[in-house]
Amino acid sequence: MLIKNEKGLINCIYAGGTQFSAQLEAILKATEKSVHIINIKKTMPSDTIWHDIATRLDTTLKTFIDHSRIKDFNNKADYSEESLVKILAQYPEALIGAIVMENDHIEHITRYTELLKFFNVDSSGLEKTMHSNPPTIERQTSDERFI
C-alpha cells in the first residue's frame, strides 16, 4: 500500500516536474513533520486508493484531472473511475494540484500556500488584529528616534 497511515504523518500525492511540485517539495522537505511524498510520475496509487480519496473528498476523480492536458479527452463522456485512473496513469501531468492527507484530514490543494495549514502556519505570523489597532508612533524606549 502506498499511503502510510501513521499518526502525525502527512501523505502528499502530486505529479512532479512542475513549478508547483517544486514548491511543494521544498515546503515538505523543510518541515519538521514526518512526510511521505508520492510522485505519480514514478508511482501511481491503485484504483482503490484513488476511489477512497474521491469518496473522502465527496467528489469524482474527474475533478482532479486537467482535461486540456490530455489528447482526445472527451469532456462529455462518462468515464468510469477505473478508466480515469488509467488515463491519469498515462497522463500524470494532468493531475490538478495535489492531494494532502494527515490522519483523517484530507484536502485537494491547488496552491502550495494551502499546504501551510497542515503545518499550523499562519500566513504572516502577525496577530490577526493588526488591521484594527492603530500603529504605535511614539517612542517606546529612549534609544528610538523618529523623524
Image (spheres, grey):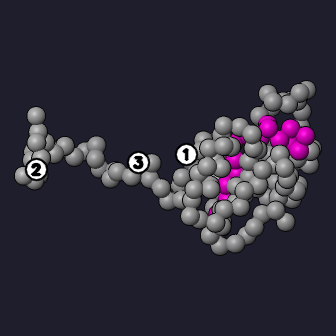
Q: Which mark is residue 113?
A: 1
Q: Secondary structure at mark 3?
A: loop
Crowd around label 3: few <14 · some 14–19 · many ≥20 (10 Å): few
Q: Is residue 12 magenta?
A: no
Residue located at (73% from left, 70% from top):
5
Q: Alpha-carbon distance for marks 1 and 3?
A: 11 Å
Residue 138, x across and y down, in percent: 9, 45
Q: Nearer the viewer, residue 32 or 70?
A: 32
Q: Secondary structure at mark 2?
A: loop
**Disc 2 residue type?**
Asp
Circle nearer the viewer, 2 or 1? 2
Q: Nearer the viewer, residue 72 or 89?
A: 89
Magenta span of residues: 87-103
Crowd around label 1: few <14 · some 14–19 · many ≥20 (10 Å): few
Left-right relation of 81 to 13: right
- Is 118 situated above or below 76? below
Residue 87 placement: quadrant:
top right
**Disc 3 residue type?**
Ser
> Which image quarter is the C terminus in?
top left
Residue 142, x across and y down, in percent: 7, 52
Q: Secondary structure at mark 1?
A: helix
Residue under label 2, please give it. 143
Residue 51 placement: quadrant:
bottom right
Earlier in the chain: of badge 2 and badge 3, it is 3
> Which image quarter is the N terminus in?
bottom right
Residue under label 3, please give it. 124
